[in-house]
Amino acid sequence: MSSSARPVGPAAPRRPRVGRRGALTYAPGEPVRDAIRPAARAAAPARTAQRPPMTAADARTVPGISHLEAAQ
């Protein structure tokens, strides 16, 4: 295996995910019913650190996908 090979499976680095696709349960035995609770849970540390969460429009500019806003 070359040193440039990317790990796959459990060894692969994971990106943080928010919403129903990232988690099937909100807490043990409590299924996720919508994307609002996990998103609010992810935004809570930002508020605690006195750094309010970004708006959707601001968040789109971070990865450089602001052109998608015009399509909506």
Image (tube, rainbow, N blue to C red):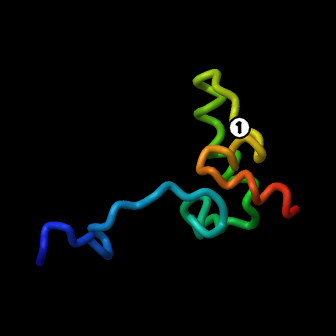
Report whether 13 appears left or right of 17.
left
Residue 33: % across, % down: 74, 67
Q: In the rendered view of the protein, which quadrant contains the C terminus?
A: bottom right
- Look at 14% across and 67% down and name the residue there: 3
Q: Nearer the viewer, residue 18 or 68?
A: 68
* Numbered-mark total: 1
- Quarter assignment of residue 22: bottom right
Task: Give above or below for 45 relative to 62.
Answer: above
Q: Tell me where residue 28 appears, x and y as whole percent.
A: 54, 62
Res 61 → quadrant: top right
Residue extending farthest to the right is: 72
Q: How far across and how far down the image is residue 70, in percent?
A: 85, 57
Quadrant of image for the N terminus: bottom left
Label 1: few (<14), some (14–19) or many (≥20) C-alpha neighbours in 10 Å: few
The x, y position of residue 39, in whole percent, is: 68, 51
When the figure is inspected, residue 48 is found, relative to residue 22, above or below; the finding is: above
Nearest to the observer: residue 51 or residue 40: 51
Q: Amino acid at mark 1?
A: Met
At x 66%, y 61%, the residue is 19
Work out whether residue 54 or residue 50 is closer to the camera in this orientation and state it.
Answer: 54
Name the residue located 46 percent from the left edge and 58 percent from the top edge.
15
Which residue is the site of mark 1? 54
Left-right relation of 66 to 63: right
Q: Is residue 62 left or right of residue 66?
A: left
